[in-house]
Image (tube, rainbow, N blue to C red):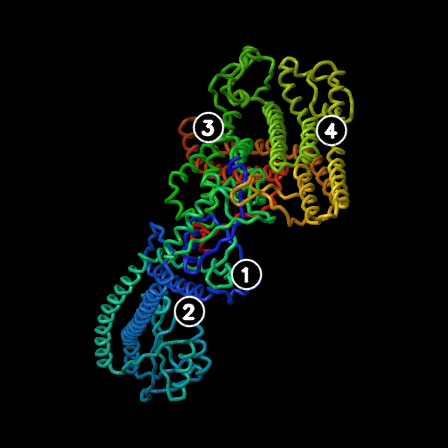
Amino acid sequence: MGSLFRSEEMCKAQLFLQSEAAFSCVSELGELGLVQFRDLNPDVNAFRRKFVNEVRRCDEMERKLRYLEREILKSQIPIPEATDNPEAPAPREMIDLESNFEKLENESREVNSNQEALKRNFLELTELKHILRKTQHFFDEMHDADKDEESHTLLGEEGPRIGQAMRLGFVAGVIERGRLAAFEQMLWRVCRGNVFLRLAEIEEPLEDPSSGDEMLKNVFIIFFQGDQLKSRVKKICEGFRAMLYPCPESQSERREMALGVMTRIEDFKAVLVQTDEHRSRVLSSAARKLSLWFIKVRKLKAIYHTLNLFNLDVTQKCLIAECWCPVADLSQIQIALRRGTERSGSSVQSILNRVDTDEAPPTYNKTNKFTSVFQSIVDSYGVSTYREVNPAPYAIITFPFLFSVMFGDLGHGAIMAIFALWMILREKPLANTLGKNEMLAPIYGGRYIIFLMGLFSIYAGFIYNDLFSKSVNIFGSSWNVSGQGFSEADLESEGSFQLNPVNTTSKDYIYPFGIDPIWQVAINKLSFLNSFKMKISVIFGVTQMTFGVFLSFLNHSYFRSNLNIFCQFIPEMIFLLSIFGYLVFMIVAKWFFFDATSSGQAPSLIITLIDMVMLGGADPPLYGDGTLQSTIQTGLIAVAVICAPWMLFVKPFILKKQNDRKVAREGHLPNRNPAVADERSSIVVFDELQGESETDPPPKYNGKEDQAGPSHSGGGHEEEEFEFGEVFVHQAIHTIEFCLGCVSHTASYLRLWALSLAHAELSEVLWTMLLGIGLGADGPVLGTILIWATFAVWATLTIGILLFMEGLSAFLHTLRLHWVEFQSKFFRGEGYAFCPFSFKVILENRDD
């Protein structure tokens, strides 16, 4: 089989790399992405490894690039994606990169610092401008009050404090509007009401120099008397971060200062524009190369991190690595090593040496963008054991098909397929939008499976003759409605009819494809469709479970486990077919043996199955006479009962007998030559267990020999001590799980019928309660208005409930049917994934 149906054949290898060529060789292997390195220094602290300084330098470069990225995004400068894939820079290029990044960071920080200082000065001048403008009104009011020769009071209620001859001091400043209430209250309490506060809003928002956020501020001026109050007022202003500015008392001085401030503001505006343009030029230049720099730095970091997994030989001139790699790609790996050696200028070729091992290799299934989503569904439950049958290729058909059985609607399936086709056709543009969105990325990644589910749902919709809960009359009904007193006018009305299957136009005419559309107006529609969907659910379930048991035979055959074929596959298949296969036979036989005229004489399948298990008779019989059917059913039950102890007892006792023979043989070997005796013992035991015991590891490299030697190691394999009790308990658990699972799993497939019924009924309810109002209205004008008013609600509920929620529900139920009911028959899922050193994977998962 190809790697799609079974994982790739893997081997363990040792790499011997010259120190000067190691970097280039690892770089080439990272571009290839077919080697999974092992850590040969698991006990060495990460800070004590050979290339830890280089990793730190890469971390520092990456930090500087992230700083530049934040500054570029803050300035709303677009960062173009890298169009090419640059190679990892040579180690000598790291110094140039570091100096370049250092220069850019320092320049950016310097420009930011200068710009912030300029903005802060500009803000102060702007605030001073507003103070000079606003305080002029305050002084005008005070001047008018002096002319009135009235006594003025302060904020307190202690009576008159000053008269005309008294002179007040004052401070002016700006405070944030959010702190104003607390500021007034504090002034009142600390100064005991002996100050006079005037406020005015600054209408335009001001920019914070540090963060760039907008701020709303107020101008204030505080009048007081005496140095003590002046000291208190200044401390309160300092505590509330209110900025105080000098404000002359005379009008001429204020006017002269305002003119000077306006001149300086214009100068600052020009300088700020020039500074911003310079900053944009610096960041725009960095933005054009930022993606390429990130790729180079991450490749550098990945290479040095990988080199830290290697060991040094005693001469300190050679790096030794261990890795897993696919056997089929060894030639590509050799070419990559040769290319890396040539790039480095080394005269000594790198060596790849395959080694024998008893360790379980990782599981590697080659996928593309179409098959990857199905493989992900399987791997989410468990990674396949090395070289066992991969369920993913079969799920390409069975998954969307079972989904469509539950979601069968022509209209809903078409909408789903069109949406998925849109994502497929706009695959590359959507990769940067939907593909990077945390919520929508799974939908984008599953575009191909959604497309298949939509297509299969269209097919199931044709079978069910269901289009948004309505039927389509394509071939003309096969029912003779006139024989039951129904006219064509009656069928066009909203009435419902009790259909009698006996009255048909012709016994030779059956509706060619799918369900006859006349069932749409039948009272007994649910009775007919429930019976039909329930039966096909059982047929599909038993068929898929039987196929799963057959796949277990492929596993046993590949691993050369004749014992499992005889003690598991054969009794499991017989048990499943003798009861549930016979149930499928009865369903099909009932369709063939009984027509509309004799349907009342047909036996109940459930009662027949119960009578079969209880060893009862067949009355009424399904086929032949009652004696023949009863005899066959009794024989099938007897065979099924025999299969249970067959699965339970035979395998543990055979394994025990094999172990006893092995122990006896090892004890009676001649002792003249211990080395030869040990070799003969290992060969005999190996040959015996090779075809019979399941406790051996699976055959490596498909049992074939290659350039590195035989597929199995000749010795050194430590076998676990045989425990009969443990083996028997394990086999008992497996037997009970399979026998009870056949019953529960068959019943679990009835969810196909249940969800299909729920989907159809919910669709019909939405149509009747929304669009049905307009379609049943009196008059075309009223009907058009009602349809226009209700269509948006119907479409929203259809997409939100029937497509999204019902689709998600059907997807999860299909997932359960594959994980539990199907894969449990043959799939162990005890492997671990092959995680190669790949620049492509590292760059795609850069956020992790």
Q: Earlier in the sequence, mark 3 or mark 1?
A: 1
> Which residue is tagged 2?
178
Check the image and report above or below for 129 versus 709.
below
Q: Could you tell me how far apart the alpha carbons at marks 3 and 2 are, in whole angstroms?
A: 58 Å
Q: Where residue 41 is drawn, which disc sits there? A: 1
Q: Please tell me whether mark 1 sits on a helix, a strand or a loop.
A: loop
Residue flagged by tag 1: what amino acid is it? Answer: Asn
Q: Earlier in the sequence, mark 4 or mark 2?
A: 2
Q: Earlier in the sequence, mark 3 or mark 4?
A: 4
Check the image and report above or below for 593 versus 584.
above
**Do the numbered discs 4 and 1 sit on residues whose CB atoms are within 8 Å?**
no
Residue flagged by tag 4: what amino acid is it? Answer: Ala
> Which residue is tagged 4?
640
Q: Earlier in the sequence, mark 3 or mark 2?
A: 2
Check the image and report above or below for 617 versus 543.
above
Q: Could you tell me how far apart the alpha carbons at marks 3 and 4 are, in whole angstroms?
A: 57 Å
Q: Earlier in the sequence, mark 4 or mark 1?
A: 1
